[in-house]
Amino acid sequence: MAGKLNNRVKSADIELKDKLVAINRVTKVTKGGRTFSFSAIVVVGDENGIVGHGLGKAKEVTEAITKGIDDAKKNLIRVPILRGTVPHMQKAKFGGAEILLKPASEGTGVIAGGAMRAVLESVGVHNVLAKSQGSSNPHNVVKATMEALSNMRDAVSVAKQRGISLDKVFNG
């Protein structure tokens, strides 16, 4: 994307909550038998506009989760939230996963499935209509959701980018 916004955030002095999206057990068959390892997809956020995702791999589940949390803290982005919902409709695609996010009125709740729900709750969105189309692979759904959220823009940033007043964004 040409108009990619630089909305990265450093994890220092931010109170982050983590959510486990998926754990995958991987089996490697060797001459000596089977070796198990685990991969964990984790989403972290402050429930106030900051969210990140990470992947951790290790021989133990807890170690994989810890590595995933550390990785997620390195990939934080800031997302504009408007009255508890997303500012505008947004589509995104990553791999085989396509997602659609739509703003919703107060009291709607988070209408989203598994992996998308974890990301949207971590970022602090309380009312949103979301649809996951295509692949339901949690890796790609999380990455597509993060892509959609990183492309969100609020009215103030649109006005600044276009060099016009805020009411001109809405009226013309």
Image (tube, grey):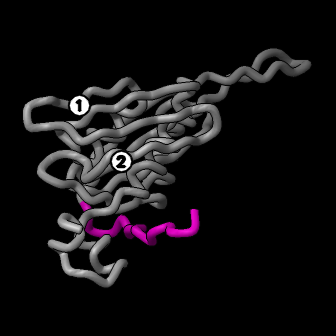
Q: Which residue is mark 1?
A: 110
73 w.r.t. 92: above or below? below
Q: Residue furthest top?
A: 33
Within 10 Å of the Cα at label 1, are there few (<14), some (14-19), or many (20+) other Cα atoms? some
Q: CA distance from mark 1 to mark 2?
A: 17 Å
Residue 150 numbered tag: none
Magenta-colored span: 1-14
Q: Residue at x 52, y 34 (%)?
A: 98
Q: Amino acid at mark 1?
A: Val
Q: Quadrant of the N terminus?
A: bottom right
Name the residue nearer the viewer: 22 or 140: 140
Give the mark nearest the N terminus, 1 or 2.
2
* Badge 2 amino acid: Val
* Residue identifier under label 2: 44
The residue at the point 22 percent across, 44 percent down is: 125
* In this rendering, position of residue 100 left or right of residue 34: left
